[in-house]
Amino acid sequence: MAVSEDYGRVDFELILNIYNRLILEFSGGIIRDMQRCPKCNSEKLMHNVRIIDRGHNDWIKSLEVEVFTKPDAIFFKGSHREALEATICGKCGHTELTVTNPDKLYQAYLESQRNSI
Ligand SMILES: [Zn+2]
């Protein structure tokens, strides 16, 4: 009896870890809602942490990713930018990055694929 109970507990932790990894790998939009660290299983998560970058004259701005909808154009490449945000584990420091509007960025990416030569 004791052995099967132990197996039950191990299986539950294993399933929880697999569940967390599946969420990370297949659901970009759900990462922000994760409740536990995928690496150490801690609940000490900090969500939507701004990542800063320094621009001209040391101006502080949010770190962004950029997709050009017309990548082969010489001018007016159709820049589309989205800010990156971090979810950071307060126990082990594991950090996951997400984009604020992944749907809009993906639409710009699809447009870039249609417009590239
Ligand atoms: Zn952690």
Image (cartoon, rainbow, N blue to C red):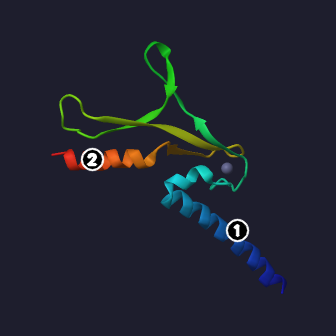
Q: In x, y percent, where is residue 21? A: 57, 61
Which residue appears at 49% of the width and 15% of the height? 58
Q: Quadrant of residue 12?
A: bottom right
Q: CA distance from mark 2 to mark 1?
A: 42 Å
Total numbered labels: 2
- Front one among 29 and 42: 29
Q: Which residue is mark 1?
A: 13
Helix, strand or loop at label 1? It is helix
The amino acid beneath tag 1 is Glu
Q: Residues within 10 Å of mark 1 (few under 14, many from 20)?
A: few
Viewer-side residue, 20 vs 7: 20
Q: Nearer the viewer, residue 108 or 95?
A: 108
Q: Which residue is mark 2?
A: 111
Left or right, 84 with respect to 18, comes to left
Q: Which marked residue is nearer to the observer: mark 2 or mark 1?
A: 2
What residue is at 66 percent from the left and 66 percent from the top? 16
